[in-house]
Amino acid sequence: MNISNLDLRAAIMHNMQGSSKDDVRHTIVDAITSGEEKTLPGLGVLFEMVWQEADEQEKNKMVDCIHQHVQ
C-alpha cells in the first residue's frame, strides 16, 4: 500500500492498524502533550471513529464534556 496516494483518514488508519491498546494510548497522549498542530488531524480522525461507533447516550456525554471545557 502506497501511503502517498491515500487520503488523510486512510493514512492515519493505516498507521494505526495493528496497534496495541498501549500503542493507541501512547499515540493519543503524545499527540496531546506535544502541543504540535500537526497532530490535530490525527486526533480528529480518532475522535471521528469513536463518534461513529457511539450510541446517543455516549454522544451526549461527549458533547456535554466538550461543552463544559469550552465555556
Image (cartoon, grey):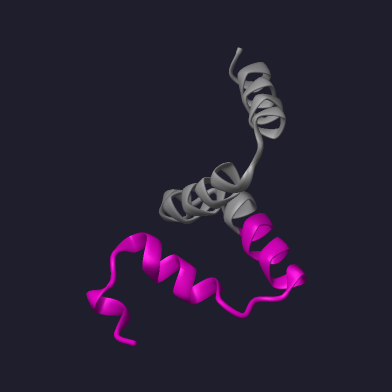
Q: Is residue 45 left or right of residue 10?
A: right
Q: Residue furthest bottom?
A: 1
| 27 magenta-colored | yes
Instruction: Say which quadrant the N terminus sits in.
Output: bottom left
Quadrant in which residue 38 is drawn: bottom left
Residue occupying image coordinates x 64% and y 31%: 59
- Tell which of 16 and 56 is nearer to you: 56
Residue 7 drawn above or below residue 38:
below
Residue 16 drawn above or below residue 63:
below
Q: Is residue 62 left or right of residue 8?
A: right
Quadrant in which residue 8 is drawn: bottom left
Q: Is residue 24 left or right of residue 40?
A: right
- Tell which of 54 and 44 is nearer to you: 54
Residue 4 drawn above or below residue 34:
below
Coordinates of residue 67 in the picture (x, y in percent): 61, 18
The image shows a total of numbered marks equal to 0
Q: Residue furthest left?
A: 5
Residue 34 drawn above or below residue 63:
below
The secondary structure that dominates the magenta segment is helix
Coordinates of residue 68 in the picture (x, y in percent): 67, 17
Residue occupying image coordinates x 46% and y 75%: 14
Residue occupying image coordinates x 55% and y 54%: 46
Magenta-colored span: 1-30
Q: Is residue 25 left or right of residue 1?
A: right
| 69 magenta-colored | no
Instruction: Say which quadrant the C terminus sits in.
Output: top right
Coordinates of residue 47 in the picture (x, y in percent): 55, 46
